[in-house]
Each structure stands twice: as C-alpha cells, then as structure tokens.
Image (tube, grey):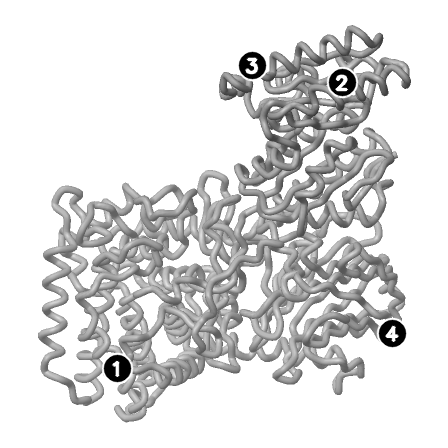
C-alpha cells in the first residue's frame, strides 16, 4: 500500500493544508509514529515516519514537532528524531530538558508525594509499573491483567488523583498525575505560536490527544489513528498509514514550496495580441495567461504554482523533449516542434473587446495528449468543467470561459476542488484546433477560417516590423526586441506594460518578487522612445494621449504617481496570493505594487525626452511645420512636466529603483529634473514656443547643485545620492543625459568606478548598498546597456563591443530578455520579458552600428 491508498477526502485536506505559508506538523508518539508494544522501551518509530518528519522540518516555513506523554529524555532517546524536530514531553510539560528546574519547591514536594503513592499502588498490583517524569508520574497497567489494572487505576482515581494541585490525564492503560497545569492542546498552541504557523496538522491515537484535536480550527487537520470516539476530522487505521500520510504531506509541501519544476525564465516565450499577452514554456505549456487584461488575475498561473495553479499542456503521447521552439519570423506566433508533432500558438486579433482568446493548432503524425486545467483568479475559485459536443464549458467563474474543440473527446477528472480535462488527439487525420475563449459562452465557429485568422494576426506584426529601421547589428535579434516591446503595448488604452509577469524573483527563493504588469511613466516613455527611434511613432502618440488622460484626474502634474493600471487608474493596495508557492518557491506572490505610492521625481524627464525625440522624428518624416512637429497637446505636456520639476525638484525621493526606505536626494532623479528643463528649452528654441525665462535659471541651478553635491571626492565618482558614498549605475546618466560633458574627467572616473564596483562579467548591478530588503538580486540588463553607452562616450569602444556581445549571449533561445541576470548561476532573473532590457539592447545596437568615430545619439 501507499499514500495513494489513503481516503481521497483526506488527501485533499492534506494537499490544501500543504499550501499555507507556515505549516506546523505535530504528532503523538506511541500508537502514532511508533506501534504500541508490550515493552515501552522497545517502541521504536517507523523509519518512514522519522524520514518524513525530518524532511518536513527541513523545509522552508515548516515546523515539525512530537508531543508525547513520555518523559522528554526517554522520548529523545527512543524516537531517534533529529534535532530539527521539536520534542515536547510529559503531555506538554517538558519543552526542554531543564524544565524541571522551573518547578517551585511546593510542586517538587507534591511530586515526591505522588511518586510515593503511585509506587505503593504498583507494588500492590502485579504487572503495574510507574514512570517518573520531571513534572509528573505515570502509572501503566498495560502489562497487568484487566482485573488488576482496573483495580490499580481505581486506587489512583480515589487517592492521589483527588489531591489539590494534581492534574490528571488518562490514556489507554495509563493514568498520569502532573504537578503543573498542562495538556497536549496547550502544548500544540504554544508551538503554533512560537512557529507563527498559519495552519497545523496533528496525528494522535489516545484520549489524551483529544485536547490537541479540540484546539484545531479553520484549515487545521486532525487525524485520529485507530478506533474510538474522536473530534478529529479524519481517521487512519494504523501507524503505517501515518507514515504514508506524512510522506504524502511532505511531497505536497515540497512540491508547493519548490513551485514544481519551474522552467528557466529565459526559456519562456511570449505570445501577444494588441491587448493580451501569454507565456509558453519550451514544451508548449501555457504557463501564464490573464483575463480580461494583462494586469488582471491569471487563468493559468502554472509559472507561479506548478500544474495545480492552472495550465494548458500539449505533449506527444509518447514522451519526448521538443526539438525546437521558435517564432514565425516577424510575428508573435510560436511554433513548438517534436519529431512527428507540431503545435502552433497565437492570440487572435479578430475578437470583441471583452474577450481574451488563444488558439492552439496541433499537426503531425503522432498522437498528442492535451490537458486543459483552467484555474481562474489565481486558482482561488473552484471550477468545474462541462463537456459539450463542440468543446468544454468552464463553470464557477464570474466571466464565462469556453474551449472550442470540435471532435475532441474529453475525460474530466477532479482533485476535489478543481476539475481538469484530458484528451488524446490524432492530428494525422487533420489539424486539431483548440480555441480558448475567455469572456464569452459562444461555441460557434469563427466568421473566418483558422488559417485566415492566423494570417490576419501574423500580418499585423509582420507589416509593422517590416517598416522599422533596425540596427545593422544582430538584425534578427533586434527585430525580436522591437516586436517584444510592441507586444507590451496595450493598444486599447495606449499604455505600455513594464513586463508581462508578476513575481518572477530577483533572487531564487527570496522575497524580491514584484508585479510589473502595469504602466510606469518612466518605463513606458523609454519604450515608446525606443520605438520612435526605430521609425514607429504611433505607440508614442497613443501613450502621450494616455498621459494626458491621467493628468486630467490630478490636481497638478507634480502629483503624478510613478505607475498606474493599464487604463490609467490608481492601483489597489499591494497584496499577496498566499495560495501560490511562487516561481521555484520564491514567495510572496504579489499583485499590485506599493511603489505606486512612492515619490519618484525622475518621471517627468523621460516624458519630455520622449516628446523631444518624437518631434525630431516627425521632422525626419517630412513634417516641417513646427505646429505639427510639436503639437499644442505635446507642448502642454512639456510645460506641465517643467512646472512639476519647478515645484518638487528640491525634495528627496525614492528614486528609479523604488527603494522601500527613507527618501534620499538621488542624483539620477536630480539629473532627470535637469533633463526635463533642458529638453524643454531645446524644444522651445527649435519649434518656436514661448517659455518662462525662469526655466533657464532653473536648469542651471539644478546642474550646479548636482555637480557640487553629487560628486564624492573619497570614492572618485558621482554617487547614488547626496548623502552617501554608495554607487548607483543610474548615476551614469549625469553624462548620458548631457548634464556634464562626456569629456569631463569626473564622468570618466564615474564610469571606471561603476565598472569596478558594479560590473560582474556580463552584467552590471544597480547598486550594492543595503536597501532594507533581505536577499540579493541579479545584475540588470538595462544597467549593462547604460555602461555600454558610457564606454562609447569615453572612447572605450572595444569594452562596449565586448559587453554588448555578452548581453546578446544571455538572451533566451527565442530572443527574449528578462529583467536581470545571475552571472554566477548563469540564469535569468526577474519579470519577463522586460521592456527595460529590450530597449537597452536596441539602444546599444544602434550606437554600436554607427561608425567608430560617431558620438552617442542625443
């Protein structure tokens, strides 16, 4: 027999409790971990139970304990449990070996009297034995005849059990008299409090364990071993079954904590439509998919919780690894290929604004197994599936979901909470088309054929990318970067996502897990600017329209938040999805972003820089009329951003990196304030706009302060902030922006110091100072791109080329970059794909594609 032979409802309960942030697993000893035997000194535990408890105790956020009626010293010697498992003896009166010293003199005297009385009773009754403990004495009658045992217990009940100050605990063939007030329920609560446990599991077989069962509530699970009345929710029939249950709980807990078998971040591939995104694993599992918007709750959150968090999988019936996964050139369609099987995935474009659709087409000569396991609302909503002639209907969600799959025969299975569907299909008879439709109950065929719908989707991307002016270096990779940035554009609103995911970790197993599925003013401005530099202006124009709409909701431009929802609304409070274990066990999984409420005074600069780049690009496209190259609406935005800088530039802020500590006078933020005014002055001269004369003075004042207070003579570099000696890669913008001339020795010194302090092989870290959060992080691809540009500005072209080559090498197999890179583990980190990383890569390729003597672009 095995754990799978345990009752289904019991396994469901263990699976559920295994998914709490902090778990306490506690058990009685005799009759639970160890079988009942006639000689108590030979009650050895099952080896499998010991192994499971040891392993549970070693897991993150998991405490294991044994609460026994035995004396702590005997329990430790007999159980053979490691020190990681907390042992509590004497029904909870012994939490450590020295507990006896905490008993006062009166209790010690009473204990001696109880020992004398019970020893006399044992002497008078053959087969009865006495066990002496630090705070109690137990009388055992297991080896006496029933008549003698009954007589001995009665003598205890009518004698010392009635004494004042004595606490009585009766079990199977034993009565225990303690001189301290304690029981297993109190002990369980004590351990729970010490561990900060979100839920507890307790195994017990004796009547003394009922007090522990009675303190269980909510998600807790109590398991009674053997016969007899009990308040425990579940029951198993033997100590062997306890071993199976512990093994099952261990596997469920370990899998949940590890995030199942998390695919490497850089190997994830993004699908996109004008309003939706989805992520695929290298073996064609839909691992991330949100509805109705990219910043909504996930329907498939496999990426952050493994199969139980929702997935849509297609694989050969005969197991085997895929041979390849690639984009159809110039599109966001992905092909995954095995030896005799191919899956094509894309997000259709010809759908209503309320829908989110995904189309999957299976072709080939081999049979495929399809598993459809939707888990809406991050798996927090139980779902059932209904098979119909043309597909599957999902029940239990607020928004309807159907899977159109005519001709597919589905088998529906349940795990007790959710249902999943499985089918074996044979594409050798013709393509198998699976159409996931979120936001509708419509099973009807689409108005156009599947090949035409695919063609329409692919033409959308191919026509757009064909009109770009791409850098000559690595043209295929540059096209993919451009398409990735365009895929992060949310066309209905005009906003731009910073990344497609939430909570992919900056440190595997750590807490630096943030939600990037929103529109940051800074990130979106830089993304739109990168697209303008490639010749695509529409995204920038639509984004600036989005900024206008956001400003209309504010009392003044200086009150801009750093980020908003895709439709320009204020974010709800940051929250955690505790039911998800996180990518590779990296918790918490966050939704929302507390940076929304931070002060980030650099945000005005990127907006004005975008408007400047856009105006000059319009000129290059033949728009020579100043009023059309720089429309009134754009100039109004410029004025608003300058006014915001006028009002707030002298304040400290949280900076570009959104450090969750006290605000500082960050050099980068001051530089962006300077850039706001400088670009505004340049635009006014170029496009004949009127300005406030105070702008020139403001620009010079900011520059003078940054030069004086940002430089630190001791470290020979401009620093992260005025008040410290710590370095920050963002400070390179003092030269990249033009605030100081790149020929200034202080800029060259800053580049050298940044390289020495923050560069590690193929990547560059943001900073190394303590930011108040535990754990570490990887180097940032964007910071590496800044250093490439800085190298070029100070004449180190060969260093720039070498670092660019390393940056190219860490891109994933389909050309995507996440936020960060761990140069030691050689793996990507952070949300994916990240707009910052791709716009940095494009910028480097543009600069390096110029003649060696050319200066960096303004």
Q: Give the left or right position of residue 576, taking residue 676 as reference.
A: right
**Identity of the residue drawn at 70% across and 53% down:** 307
Q: Which mark is residue 388?
A: 4
**Label 3 to label 4: alpha-carbon separation:** 77 Å
Residue 94 percent across, percent down from the top left: 58, 23
Q: Nearer the viewer's eye, disc 2 or disc 1? A: 2
Q: Give the left or right position of residue 745, taking residue 402 as reference.
A: left
Q: Is residue 308 above or below residue 400?
A: above
Label 4 secondary element: strand
**Label 4 to label 1: alpha-carbon separation:** 57 Å
Q: Which residue is mark 1?
A: 640
Q: Are marks 3 and 4 in contact (CB under 8 Å)?
A: no
Q: Are marks 3 and 1 in contact (CB under 8 Å)?
A: no
Residue 179 percent across, percent down from the top left: 60, 23
**Identity of the residue drawn at 46% across and 44% down:** 822
Please tell me which residue lies in front, 414 or 171: 171
Residue occupying the far top of the picture: 123
**Identity of the residue drawn at 74% across and 17% down:** 139
Give the mark nearer the N terminus: 2 vs 4: 2
**Label 2 to label 4: alpha-carbon separation:** 56 Å
Where residue 609 sits, quadrant-wise, is bottom left
């Amino acid at each position: 027999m095995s754990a799978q032979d345990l009752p289904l409802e019991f396994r469901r309960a263990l699976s559920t409790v295994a998914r709490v942030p902090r778990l306490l697993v506690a058990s009685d000893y005799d009759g639970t971990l160890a079988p009942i035997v006639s000689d108590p000194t030979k009650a050895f535990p099952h080896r499998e139970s010991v192994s499971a408890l040891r392993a549970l105790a070693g897991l993150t956020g998991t405490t294991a304990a044994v609460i026994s009626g035995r004396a702590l010293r005997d329990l430790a010697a007999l159980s053979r449990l490691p020190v990681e498992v907390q042992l509590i003896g004497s029904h909870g009166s012994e939490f450590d070996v020295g507990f006896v010293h905490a008993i006062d003199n009166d209790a010690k005297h009473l204990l001696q009297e109880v020992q004398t009385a019970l020893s006399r009773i044992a002497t008078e009754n053959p087969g009865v034995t006495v066990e002496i403990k630090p705070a109690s004495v137990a009388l055992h009658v297991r080896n006496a005849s029933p008549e003698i045992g009954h007589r001995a217990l009665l003598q205890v009940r009518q004698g010392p059990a009635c004494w004042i100050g004595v606490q009585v605990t009766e079990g199977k063939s034993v009565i225990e008299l303690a001189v301290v007030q304690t029981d297993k329920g109190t002990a369980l609560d004590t351990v729970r409090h010490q561990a900060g446990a979100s839920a507890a599991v307790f195994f017990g077989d004796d009547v003394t364990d009922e007090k522990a069962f009675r303190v269980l509530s909510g998600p807790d699970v109590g398991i009674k071993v053997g016969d007899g009345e009990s308040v425990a929710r579940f029951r198993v029939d033997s100590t062997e079954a306890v071993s199976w249950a512990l093994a099952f709980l261990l596997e469920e807990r370990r899998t949940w904590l590890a995030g199942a078998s998390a695919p490497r971040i850089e190997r994830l591939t993004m699908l996109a439509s004008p309003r939706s995104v989805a992520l695929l694993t290298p073996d064609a599992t839909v691992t991330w998919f949100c509805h109705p918007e990219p910043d909504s709750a996930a329907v498939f959150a496999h990426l952050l919780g493994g199969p139980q968090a929702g997935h849509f999988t297609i694989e050969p019936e005969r197991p085997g690894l895929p041979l390849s996964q690639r984009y159809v050139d110039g599109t966001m369609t992905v092909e995954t290929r095995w030896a005799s099987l191919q899956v094509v995935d894309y997000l259709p474009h010809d759908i209503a604004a309320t829908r989110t659709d995904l189309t999957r087409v299976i072709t080939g000569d081999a049979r495929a197994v399809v598993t459809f396991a939707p888990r809406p609302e991050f798996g927090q909503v139980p779902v059932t599936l209904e098979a119909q002639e043309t597909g599957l209907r999902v029940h239990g969600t607020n928004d309807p979901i159907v899977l159109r799959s005519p001709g597919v025969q589905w088998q529906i299975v349940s795990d007790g909470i959710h249902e999943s569907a499985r089918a074996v299909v044979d594409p050798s008879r013709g393509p198998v088309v699976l159409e996931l439709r979120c936001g509708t109950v419509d099973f009807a065929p689409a108005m156009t054929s599947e090949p035409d719908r695919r063609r329409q989707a692919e033409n959308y991307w191919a026509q757009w990318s064909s009109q770009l002016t791409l850098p000559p270096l690595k043209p295929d990779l540059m096209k993919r970067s451009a398409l990735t940035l365009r895929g992060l554009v949310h066309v209905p609103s005009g906003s731009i996502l910073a990344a497609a995911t939430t909570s992919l970790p900056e440190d595997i197993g750590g807490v630096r897990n943030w939600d990037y599925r929103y529109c940051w003013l800074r990130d979106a401005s830089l993304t739109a600017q990168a697209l303008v530099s490639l010749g695509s202006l529409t995204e920038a124009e639509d984004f600036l329209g989005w900024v206008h709409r956001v400003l209309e909701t504010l009392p003044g431009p200086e009150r801009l938040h750093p980020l908003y929802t895709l439709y320009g609304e204020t974010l709800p409070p940051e929250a955690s999805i505790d039911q998800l274990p996180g990518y590779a066990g990296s918790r918490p999984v966050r939704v929302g972003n507390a940076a929304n409420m931070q002060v980030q005074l650099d945000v005005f600069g990127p907006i004005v820089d975008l408007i400047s780049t856009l105006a000059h690009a319009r000129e290059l496209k033949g728009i020579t009329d100043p009023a059309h190259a720089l429309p009134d609406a754009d100039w109004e935005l410029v004025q608003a951003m300058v006014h915001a800088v006028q009002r707030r530039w002298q304040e400290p802020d949280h900076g570009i990196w959104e450090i969750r500590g006290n605000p500082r006078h960050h050099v980068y933020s001051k530089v962006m304030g300077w850039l706001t005014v400088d670009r505004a002055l340049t635009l006014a001269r170029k496009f004949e706009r009127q300005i406030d004369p105070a702008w020139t003075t403001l620009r010079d004042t900011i520059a003078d302060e940054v030069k004086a207070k940002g430089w630190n003579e001791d470290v020979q570099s401009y620093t992260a902030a005025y008040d410290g000696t710590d370095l920050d890669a963002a400070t390179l913008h003092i030269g990249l922006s033009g605030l100081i001339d790149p020929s200034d020795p202080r800029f060259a010194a800053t580049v050298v110091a940044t390289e020495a302090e923050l560069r590690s092989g193929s990547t560059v870290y943001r900073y190394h100072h303590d930011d108040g959060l535990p754990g570490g992080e990887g180097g940032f691809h964007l910071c590496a791109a800044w250093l490439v540009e800085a190298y070029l500005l100070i004449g180190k072209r060969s260093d720039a080329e070498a670092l660019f080559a390393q940056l190219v090498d860490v891109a994933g197999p389909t050309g995507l970059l996440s936020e960060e890179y761990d140069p030691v583990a050689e793996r990507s980190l952070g949300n994916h794909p990240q707009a910052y990383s791709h716009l940095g890569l494009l910028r480097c390729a543009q600069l390096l594609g110029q003649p060696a003597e050319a200066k960096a672009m303004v």
